[in-house]
Amino acid sequence: MAEPVSQNAAEDDPDRAEEPKPRLSRSEERGGSRRRRAKPAKKRSFWKELPILLVIALVLTILIQTFLAKVFMIPSGSMEATLHGCTGCTGDRILVDRVTYDFAEPEPGDVVVFKGPPAWTQNEIPPQESSNLVVRALRGLGSLVGFAPPDERDFVKRVVAVGGQTVQCCDSQNRVVVNGKGLDEPYVHWENPDDTQEKTFAPVLVPPGTVWVMGDNRNNSDDSRFQGGGGPNGAVPVGNIIGKARVIVLPPGRWGGITDHNPQAAAQPVAIGAPAWQSGIPLGVGVAAAWPTLFFGRRLKAGLRRAVRRKS
């Protein structure tokens, strides 16, 4: 009587040949591979991604404004009409390049934003910080994008002279003079066309490593002429400069670049007028010398004639 064969006969008897598996068609193989693929993960909803996007944008904004460029608000009219600013109105928002002065020195004509040195801020009252953390956070965020009032110890002015140059005001044409040359300053704003520069000052040698700055609204600007009592104390250390003002970004109607016209490029030598009696000296000397020259010239000519006659 035959014994029933076990279902695991191939395993029980190693000498027994394993039965071949049926071969699948290509379409069946493809179908199986599709079934084995993992289902794609569901995308996050927009509202879940929004906080992540905001955090990334905030971090990028902080990095850019810390190392590359920053937006500042103009709080006063000292730079009219180049930059608008007034109490209770919408001042210009300017983009300040923080990289330029890492590779180059400030030049005459540059509009710069800088931290006021001690001579400029010794009488300033530090701004009162709110005790509310939310208010302080919002103010800090607003200052990053130029929508909050700036630190009162930050200033924006135009470089007029650099270290080693001598600056003074003014010549007979009401021009600031640097190294004996009257500056070409088309950007200076006069509220009255007949105005002249009210603050005159004796020659000042700008200390090395500093710049002499003045506002374009020349008679309405507390700048190097006044700060620290004027003189060398009014100069601003180059290390205090935050960056160079490049572009007006807001409001939209004021979009445009900020002029950096170099006032020294077309500077003209200052002629020092001599008293009237001095201008007549050359003529008097000439007349006085003419008579002896004429007298001795005639005597010499007569003597030569006599000598020629004797020889003949």
Image (spheres, grey):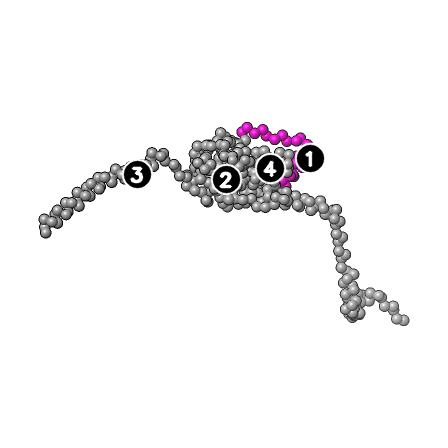
Name the spot of residue 120 as percent of width and height, x first. 53, 32
Residue at disc 1, secondary structure: helix
Q: Percent x, y for residue 36?
A: 77, 60
Distance from Cα at disc 3 to Cα at disc 1: 82 Å
Are the two marked residues, 2 and 4, in contact with CB atoms closer than 8 angstroms?
no
Type of amino acid at the residue the image marks with label 4: Gly
Q: Amino acid at mark 1?
A: Val
User: How many residues crowd mark 1 within 10 Å: few (<14), some (14–19), many (20+)?
Assistant: few
Tell whether 86 sits left or right of 232. Answer: right
Residue 134's label in the rendered image is 1
Q: What's the magenta region? A: 122-147
Counting from the top left corner in percent of width and height, residue 268 is at 43, 42
User: Is residue 134 within the magenta segment?
Assistant: yes
Circle 3 or circle 1, nearest the eye: 3
- Residue that carries the numbered disc 2 in the rendered image: 159
Furthest residue toward right: 1
Mark closer to the chain start, 2 or 4: 4
Q: Position of residue 259 (x, y in %)?
A: 54, 44
- Using the image, tell me which numbered label, if any, was put on residue 85: 4
Does residue 233 appear in the picture of this structure? no
Q: Residues within 10 Å of mark 4 (few under 14, many from 20)?
A: many
